[in-house]
Amino acid sequence: MKIQKTYHFYAAHRNKEAGEKCGRIHGHTYDVVCVFDLKMNGALTVLFSDIDAKVEPIIKEYDHYFLLEENDPLCPALDHLNEPYKAMPFATSAENMAIWLFNRIKRETGLNICRIELAETKSSNVIYEQ
Ligand SMILES: [Zn+2]
């Protein structure tokens, strides 16, 4: 049985690898659609609230943060100003964020996630499946 859950977080980022426009600091409402392949246990698979309890804390770690590649020259400046941000071990493209969240959810929740869709805008999303 496939179970789909949708989450959201708001974050700023910049991606210097993606051209002048995306290299500027800007923000997104990230929509994250997770699909889980779960076995039936009686009349259901798992309570939706049980999935939320495991997945939402991971998603919320990035909510209302500035996501920066860890080698971005802004990181030392923000450290100096004691401004919070999230240092990511990759360029903060939608593709990399989708793979990162997929792997964290798979590893940390024990839920059998099989697909993730991550949208930065209403018209564009990336899909990662395993
Ligand atoms: Zn962006």
Image (spheres, helix red, strand yellow):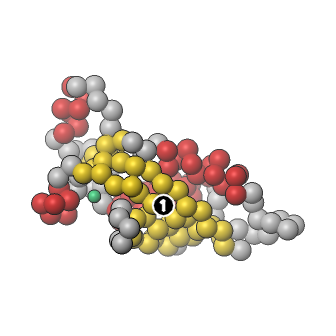
Q: How far across and down, in percent of the image, does residue 120 sit?
A: 36, 62
Which class describes the residues within 10 Å of circle 1: few (<14), some (14-19), or many (20+)?
Answer: many
- The residue beneath circle 1 is 32
At x 43%, y 44%, the residue is: 63
Q: Residue at x 70, y 68 (%)?
A: 38
Name the quadrant containing residue 76: top left
Q: Is residue 117 left or right of residue 109?
A: left
* Residue 106 falls in image quadrant: bottom right
Residue at the limit of the structure toward the right, as seen here? 42
Residue 10: x %, y % from top left: 40, 49
Q: Quadrant of the N terminus?
A: bottom right
Residue that appears at 17% across and 56% down:
23
Q: Is residue 121 left or right of residue 52?
A: left
Q: Is residue 51 left or right of residue 23?
A: right
Instruction: Indicate the amino acid at tag 1.
Output: Val
Answer with the quarter of the image where residue 78 lies: top left
Q: Residue furthest left?
A: 20
Residue 105: give x, y in percent of width and height: 55, 55
Residue 124 at least partly seen:
yes
The one nearer the camera, 106 or 81, is 81
On screen, residue 68 versus residue 39, left or right, reads left
Residue 17 visible? The answer is: no
Q: Is residue 12 above or below residue 93?
A: above
- Residue 81 location, x and y as percent? 22, 25
Under circle 1, the secondary element is strand
- Quadrant hosting ligand 1: bottom left
